[in-house]
């Protein structure tokens, strides 16, 4: 049995920490500075990680290879199975013309002001997509819609990435929180409530912050009422549902409430300087030629969608919401579930930090969330075909999905393989132990444990599985609140979603920015750090100044 080494470099925790973060630094530098494509950056990080795991952490090569393949398998199923079917659904909507119809509905029912469109699509609608599926699909779908509404591709993806933060901890119907409960054995509702006393602060502030990032402080002087309606309605609903109902529905209900409130609000109010921020609408169909697509969009925009067309425009998103919610609460995903003890890895490694063998159980769910989204896609396609679309759209959309996601699949496989290698080699626990040794300032830096884990895996769920229990152990040693520290791991993770290679490549590949993920990282990195530091300050205040806010 391989015993994980916690201080393999000169028996020094600091030096071991500095060596352990080299693979992360490699990925960030290659992405943001050298500007290599995400899949190459992730591959380089994985190769460096393998070398360090084998030659510094002294992990047997067979175990290193097995753990990496375990991570790659998880990346394919369930992660990319969810993303694949969500993108297939999106492409069916595009090929059938209903995505264009959805865009046209926006043209006629909300002000043609880029700031308003950003709040509705990037913030509220994006949160709905995160609440249902997560794993990068909100960035891909919302970026494409914003481009169809006149945004530049780089602006579209940067803004949707910044917005794809506050909903993440309750994404995929609360799976990150239920996973956190599973690894910490802390009450689910208490964890949900604590996260719900952190992230709503950002939900309120984020619309203001994003508008300043996109259009400057001056633009906020006339558009702040819409930002307030979007943020306040979302934050209040997210707080109430997470504190009094549970972690499954905060995103879905908060996004629907926010979406409805903003759309209704702009029917009776609009910024006085809308003309200055007028959207130059373009065709939402990336398969159309540029000139023909523009002419078609211009002609179509003159026609207000009928009630029937409106229902068809919204159908894919309402249908997938309903199917996934029913699927989840009915427990369909557990039917046919198979738990596989991963060969040559299960209980073959000793967790030195926790003094127990490291289990490696791969859970295969043929009827998981991705399959629910597949069903929603097939139902959507059936309705579209019945309403006049050609049956060939199903296969055309499938081909579109392959073209969009082939590099994203590689990136996610490499980066999640690296995340699993970090876990099983012991590098992750060395990093966690180093940060947890900071004493009284640990609450501030605990945010960055979640931040690092989510950057690697692209998943708040995986971040909680990795560092959730470590946060609790550190809290008990330092006489801090275990519930606060565990919840902070989940809240901290959301702040690195905007720079995670998994998230970046899924969004970039959909809107024609494949290979240019480095440009996106350069635009989002410091926003990620700023928001993480702000969260760290809030956690310090919650622990030391207002401990009564922590649920028991």
Image: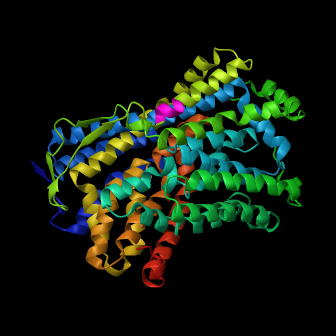
In the image, 543: left or right of 119? Answer: left
In the image, which residues are magenta? 370-374
Name the spot of residue 396 as percent of width and height, x first.
Answer: 61, 19
Say whether residue 499 is visible: no
Name the spot of residue 539 as percent of width and height, x first.
Answer: 46, 74
Q: 472 and 524: which one is in front?
A: 472
- Seen at 18% across and 46% down, the residue is 54
In the image, 205: left or right of 420? Answer: right
In the image, 21: left or right of 115? Answer: left
Numbered-mark total:
0
Magenta stretch, overall SS: helix
Question: Looking at the rendering, in which quadrant would you find the C terminus?
Answer: bottom left
Name the spot of residue 462 as percent of width and height, x first.
Answer: 38, 50
Say whether residue 491 is visible: yes
Looking at this view, name the residue that lies furthest to the left.
Answer: 1
- Seen at 63% across and 14% down, the residue is 392
Looking at this view, name the residue that lies furthest to the front.
Answer: 330
| Rendered image quadrant of residue 180 | bottom left
- Seen at 83% across and 48% down, the residue is 112
- Seen at 73% across and 65% down, the residue is 228
Give the colouring mode of the picture: rainbow
């Amino acid at each position: 049995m391989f015993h994980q080494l916690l201080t393999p470099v000169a028996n020094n925790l600091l030096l071991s920490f500095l060596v352990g973060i080299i693979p992360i630094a490699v990925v960030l530098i290659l992405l943001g500075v050298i500007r290599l494509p995400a899949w190459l950056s992730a591959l380089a990080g994985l190769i460096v990680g393998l070398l360090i795991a084998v030659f510094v952490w002294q992990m047997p090569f067979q175990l290193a290879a097995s753990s990496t393949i375990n991570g790659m398998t998880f990346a394919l199923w369930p992660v990319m199975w969810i993303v694949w079917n969500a993108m297939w659904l999106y492409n069916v909507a595009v090929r059938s013309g209903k995505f264009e119809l959805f865009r046209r509905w926006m043209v006629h029912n909300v002000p043609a002001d880029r700031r308003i469109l950003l709040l509705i699509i990037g913030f509220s609608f994006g949160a709905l997509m995160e609440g249902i599926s997560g794993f990068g699909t909100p960035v891909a779908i919302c970026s494409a819609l914003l481009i169809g509404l006149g945004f530049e591709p780089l602006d579209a993806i940067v803004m949707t990435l910044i917005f794809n933060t506050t909903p993440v901890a309750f994404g995929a119907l609360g799976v990150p929180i239920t996973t956190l409960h599973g690894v910490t054995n802390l009450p689910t509702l208490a964890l949900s409530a604590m996260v719900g006393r952190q992230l709503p602060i950002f939900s309120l502030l984020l619309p203001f912050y994003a508008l300043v990032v996109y259009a400057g402080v001056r633009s906020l002087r006339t558009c702040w009422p819409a930002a307030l309606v979007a943020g306040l309605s979302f934050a209040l609903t997210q707080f109430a549902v997470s504190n009094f109902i549970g972690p499954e529905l905060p995103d879905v209900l908060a996004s629907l409430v926010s979406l409805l409130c903003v759309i209704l609000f702009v029917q009776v109010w609009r910024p006085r300087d809308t003309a200055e921020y007028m959207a130059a609408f373009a065709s939402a169909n990336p398969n159309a030629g540029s000139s023909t697509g523009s002419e078609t969009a211009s002609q179509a925009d003159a026609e207000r969608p009928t009630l029937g067309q409106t229902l068809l425009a919204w159908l894919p998103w309402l249908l997938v919401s309903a199917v996934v919610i029913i699927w989840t609460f009915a427990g369909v995903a557990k039917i046919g579930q198979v738990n596989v003890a991963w060969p040559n890895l299960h209980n073959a490694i000793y967790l030195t930090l926790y003094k127990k063998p490291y289990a490696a159980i791969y859970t295969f769910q043929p009827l998981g969330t991705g399959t629910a989204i597949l069903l929603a896609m097939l139902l959507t396609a059936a309705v579209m075909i019945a309403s006049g679309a050609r049956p060939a759209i199903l296969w055309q959309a499938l081909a579109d999905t392959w073209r969009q996601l082939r590099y994203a699949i590689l990136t996610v496989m490499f980066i999640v393989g690296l995340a699993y290698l970090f876990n099983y080699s012991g590098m992750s626990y060395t990093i966690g132990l180093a940060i947890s040794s900071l004493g009284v300032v640990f609450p501030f830096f605990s945010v960055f444990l979640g931040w690092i884990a989510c950057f690697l895996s692209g998943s708040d769920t995986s971040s909680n599985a990795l560092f959730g229990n470590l946060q609790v152990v550190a809290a008990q040693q330092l006489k801090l609140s275990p519930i606060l520290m565990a919840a902070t791991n989940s809240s901290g993770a959301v702040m690195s979603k905007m720079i995670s290679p998994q998230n970046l490549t899924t969004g970039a590949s959909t809107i024609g920015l494949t290979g240019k993920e480095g440009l996106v990282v350069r635009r989002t990195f410091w926003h990620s750090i700023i928001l993480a530091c702000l969260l760290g300050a809030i956690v310090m205040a919650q622990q030391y100044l207002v401990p009564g806010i922590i649920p028991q």
